[in-house]
Image (spheres, rainbow, N blue to C red):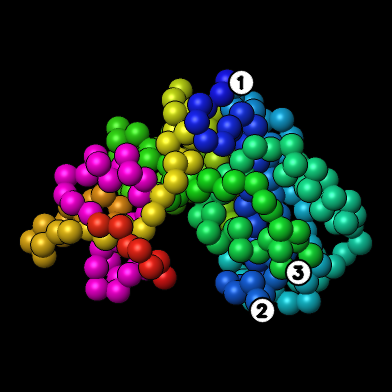
Amino acid sequence: MSLGDGPKAETVLILDTETTGLDPEQDHCVEVGCILFDVPSRSVLIQQSFLLPVETNGAEAINRIPARISRLPQPWQAGLAFFIQLVEASDVVVAHNAAFDRQWFGHGLLPPITKPWLCTMDDIRWPSHRQLKPRPSVRDLALAYGIPVWAAHRALTDCIYLADVLARCDDLEQLLKHGMEPRVLMRAKVSYDNRSLAKDAGFRWNDPLPGCWSRRLSPREAAELPFEVTAVEDEP
């Protein structure tokens, strides 16, 4: 099933990473998890998870991956080669907080990814009856769709949650189509007394623009807001 104008999204690669820190210039990706997902049938095609060898892991307390485990004998090179094939087989790469995950590709052992990216935290506007925050966590997103949360902070686990969410979306094609609309950074034109309007619409104060409420929006989304916005010409 085609989504009309824009990139198609019939086969998506749901992706998550675990890293040794927050800076791809200094830290490293220690784990990649992914699921190749067929949108028309709402079906998981392939699941994969593999470790990459690192000397230290400053985020071990969070992801619980000891650096020494990552260096045990394992065919991680074959895993990486297969992962590249999965990327090639996909139309779109889907991640929660994609801005974080995508920055690790093209650094260290990971190849660059040239496929379109879609963020399930920032790009998709989840149905209002799910009562989610504008930028929900993976945990909250899963629970809103009736999916039990049984573990966290391993790459494949979060991919499984996202795959289960997508499988339960009757309007998935429309969500993906709208999620892939071109967006620009916009500033909310609201008074101090009306600042809750911007906050409820997912705008953030001081981030990324200092001294104002801002968010990346498509023209369609901007037109649906109950307040005016202006595009930021020189994005930070």
Residue 64: % across, % down: 66, 64
Instruction: Give the residue at x 25% y 41%.
Output: 223
User: Is residue 152 in the magenta section?
Assistant: no
> Which residue bears the numbered disc 2?
26
Mark 2 to mark 1 CA distance (whole Å): 41 Å
- Is residue 42 in sight in this rendering? yes
Residue 181's tag is none
Q: Which residue is mark 3?
A: 108
Q: Of the numbered discs in the image, which one, if any, rests on residue 41? A: 1
User: Residue 72: where, in percent of width, then height?
Assistant: 87, 64
Front residue of 175 and 67 = 175
Mark 2 and mark 1 lie on one chain; the one further toward the N terminus is 2
Please tell me whether mark 1 sits on a helix, a strand or a loop.
Answer: loop
Find the distance from the CA under tag 3 to the CA under tag 1. 36 Å
Position of residue 41 relative to residue 66, above or below, is above
Quarter holding residue 21: bottom right
- Secondary element at tag 3: loop
- What's the residue at 78%, 47% (across, down)? 83
Residue type at mark 3: give it: Gly
Q: Left or right: where does residue 181 sit relative to residue 110?
A: left
Tell me the magenta residue range. Answer: 205-229
